[in-house]
Image (cartoon, rainbow, N blue to C red):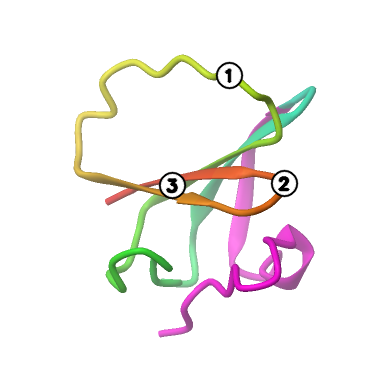
């Protein structure tokens, strides 16, 4: 399984072949992992990926373990 590479930021277009866009609004998007990509934080496969360019975000209970990854431009929340 391929791990998301965030060493130079995250470019969703590099992984578009395996991520399905579920929701997008101004500055955020939620993607479903359909290719079995692995998390850059823990190395395990993840189910959904929340990407935000916003400075603040509020989250409810994701109902599953999650990892956070920060790039220079974005916050990534990956649920397992």
Q: Nearer the viewer, mark 3 or mark 1?
A: 1
Instruction: State whether residue 45 is above or below residue 33.
Output: below
> How much space separates mark 1 and mark 2, taking CA atoms?
13 Å
Q: Is residue 11 left or right of residue 59?
A: right
Task: Report which quarter residue 65 is drawn in.
Answer: top left
Residue under pointer 1: 56
**Comparing labels 2 and 3, the label whose residue is closer to the camera:** 2
User: Which residue corresponds to mark 2?
Assistant: 73
Q: Position of residue 14 (x, y in %)?
A: 74, 72
Residue stretch in magenta? 1-24
For the residues labelled 2 and 3, the Cα–Cα distance comes to 19 Å
Q: In the rendered image, which residue does mark 3 sit on?
A: 48
- The answer to the question of whether label 1 and label 2 lie on touching residues, with beta carbons closer than 8 A, is no
Q: In the rendering, at what x and y percent does residue 48 appear? A: 43, 47
- 35 shown above or below 22: below
Mark 3 crowdedness (10 Å alpha carbons): few <14, some 14-19, many ≥20 = many
């Amino acid at each position: 399984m391929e791990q998301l590479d965030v060493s130079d930021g995250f470019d969703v277009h590099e992984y578009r072949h395996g991520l399905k866009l579920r929701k997008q609004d101004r500055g955020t998007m939620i993607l479903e992992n359909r290719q079995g990509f692995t998390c850059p934080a823990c190395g395990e496969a993840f189910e959904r990926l929340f990407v935000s360019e916003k400075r603040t975000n509020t989250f409810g209970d994701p109902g599953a373990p999650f990892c956070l990854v920060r790039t220079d431009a974005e916050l990534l929340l990956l649920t397992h």
